[in-house]
Image (cartoon, rainbow, N blue to C red):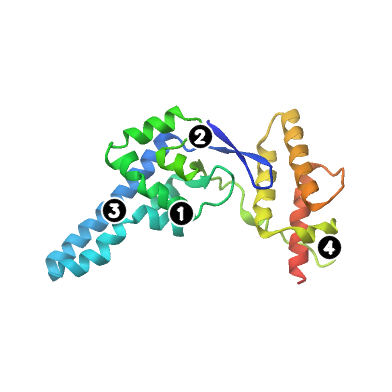
Amino acid sequence: MSKIGIETTQNVQLNFPLASVGERIAACMLDALFIGVCAFFTAMMVGLLGEAFAIGFVFLVPMLFYTLLFETFMNGQTPGKRIMKIKVCKIDGDAPGFIHYLIRWMFRLVDISLTNGVAAILTIVIGEKGQRIGDILAKTTVVKTNHSMKLTNTILSEVPDNYQLVFPESRKIEDKDLELFKRVIQQLKTMNDPVEKLTFGLKARTKVMEKLGIKTEMQPEQFFQSLIDDYNFIHKNV
């Protein structure tokens, strides 16, 4: 399985499995099917009501911006991508913004429409980061989503009322840091090589310790879980 190492804004590199060409094609075909169904019902309504311009504007224009709208409002996913469990992300680890989705949408004309998808397939296969032309320009790629670990198991952890704060420096933690902590824990759980696991964990721990001003010899997985618990305790009592 191809993976991409994404350097986050906290300077911690995480590995994400890239979506395969087959998965991306399947997602595209599912989206085409949904668009086709919408177009069919729009045509039926035009035939029944005869209000071609009004109905066409209400239904056909949104279909033209189908990918752009869904990726913007569904966090990098269209219905087809959600079914295939893949999503758009930036190669620097940040969440894409509207401008990134817009660039990808604009270059669908070259990647998919004008070349029947050949340009997209070639650039994805040849490149190392699973990017079509639109992705390269938007600095994005498409990765698999992992639903094996629920968010509530990490970020939204329950802490007892008598919980003792482990690191007072946890007050410096920002909301955006929590997703990083969750991903580090998740990646540690999936690593089988003990040396690779320890090296990655210590490197990630060192980066975060430097940012928060913490000094500890706590094991990496326990360290990141403690930061998450501290954050929940602090905000529970705000």
Residue type at mark 2? Lys
Q: Quadrant of the C terminus?
A: bottom right
Q: Secondary structure at mark 1?
A: helix
Residue drawn at (74%, 58%), measured in percent from left and top?
Answer: 173
Q: Nearer the viewer, mark 2 or mark 3?
A: 2
Residue drawn at (48%, 47%), measured in percent from left and top?
Answer: 87
Which residue is at the front of the view, 85 or 199?
199
Question: Which numbered disc, 1 or 4, marks the residue that appears first in the sequence?
Answer: 1
| Mark 2 Cα shell of 10 Å, populated few (<14), some (14-19), many (≥20) | many
Structural distance between the alpha carbons of marks 1 and 4: 43 Å
Residue type at mark 1? Ile
**Residue at which label 3 appears:** 35
Structural distance between the alpha carbons of marks 1 and 2: 20 Å
Question: Which numbered disc, 1 or 3, marks the residue that appears first in the sequence?
Answer: 3
The label shown at residue 163 is 4
| Mark 4 Cα shell of 10 Å, populated few (<14), some (14-19), many (≥20) | few
**Residue at which label 1 appears:** 99
Query: Quadrant of the rendered structure where residue 162 is?
Result: bottom right
Residue 50, placed above or below residue 21: below
Query: Could you tell me if the residues under marks 1 and 4 are in contact, i.e. CB atoms within 8 Å?
Result: no
Which residue is at the front of the view, 139 or 174?
139
